[in-house]
Amino acid sequence: MKDFWLSCGHHLLDRDAGGGLVVTDDFLKVYLARPELVPPDDACAAERELYASLRADPRRPVAAAEVAAIADADARENWALIVAFRDLLLRHPTLEAAYAALARDGAHGVPPLFMNQLVHVILRNALDGVTDARVLRAAELFFRPQRVTLHEGALLAADEETIGGINPAPVSPLVSMLGIPAAANIDIINDANAAEYFERSDRFDMALDLTAGRDGLAALAQAMERWIAHVVGVAADIEALKEMREVDLAWYVGLDAEGTAIGDRVWKGETLDQPEMERIVGLFRLTFRDPGTVREELRGEPVYLILAMSPDKIIRMKPQNLVTGLPVRHLEAVT
């Protein structure tokens, strides 16, 4: 089986009997390898001692006074964030359970970077065994912002950081450890080059065709099915629709802030103007395989999922909305 997304660190984690990801010392030490946490030459003794002790035992309790004793204000903030995040992960039996709790309770104080990294590794677990490279490329939308462009009638999505040259490689210490090349040449994934995806997956340098009626949106639908089954614990079928016509939004989930705002307007009976209609990237119809998992008043009603881009043509997907927004009777993580 071909591997992919090595930079997420999934190979450093254990799995419980239910298939959930269990934190290991090696996984925690990757966070300690982040450049923000490695003490510089002029770091104070308190910071050096804290770093050395956690390198030796990354699970050891850290008192607030230990962080407060660090002289540099930026270092104090970084250490407070990472210790709080580590403690959150250790409070839950799996990463999936920790993420579900963050989604339900709000990721207060958790940097978006850490949330995206959690999604990255959990999604890698959910997609284990998938061999369709288009599904894997579509799943990158869950944790990597995409810039959208219209080219020869096709709606193409490419990784925002990669094409912007801000940071062609994913923000992870594992990138340098694994020797992943930083150079990026963008190709649109297709039948001819799909097999190359696996060796290029950590470079995020393949664009995806999201034109209505083509394979890209269908691939994203499959990725969402796997995510919902793995994190929410319910089976659903998701179909990509070609247009927003005669759609009764009895229940809808915005897959991003823009999609939510558009859904809100349609639900209120407001008419979308042309610029708003053009920002809709994908509309999906979700049906639950077991009607008993759905809230009673909504049984038999489809759920619509709306993906849209911002006015500056960026897709910033919020996969937590698929954890908190579905009308499931008992919305809780699998693990």
Image (cartoon, rainbow, N blue to C red):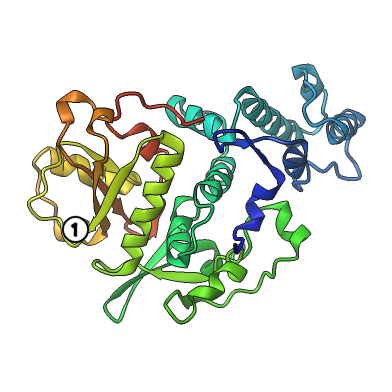
Q: Nearer the viewer, residue 116 or 274?
A: 116
Q: Quadrant of residue 234?
A: top left
Give the secondary structure at mark 1: helix
From the image, which quarter does the N terminus lie in? bottom right
Disc 1: which residue = 277
Residue 45 higher or lower than 144, as above or below: above
**What residue appears at the point 63 percent right and 51 percent down from the top-left corner?**
8
Residue 275 picture quarter: bottom left
User: Which residue shows up at 89% across the image and 34% down it?
Assistant: 52
Q: Callout 1, which amino acid?
A: Met
Q: Observer-nearest residue: 25 or 64? A: 25
Q: Position of residue 45 (x, y in %)?
A: 92, 30
Is 33 positioned to the left or the right of 245 in the image? right
Percent across and percent down for residue 299 are 17, 31
Does the rendering let one see residue 319? no
Depth check: give the residue in front, 256 or 206.
206
Foreground: 89 or 265?
A: 89
- The quadrant where residue 181 appears: bottom right
Is residue 125 visible in the rendered structure shown here?
yes
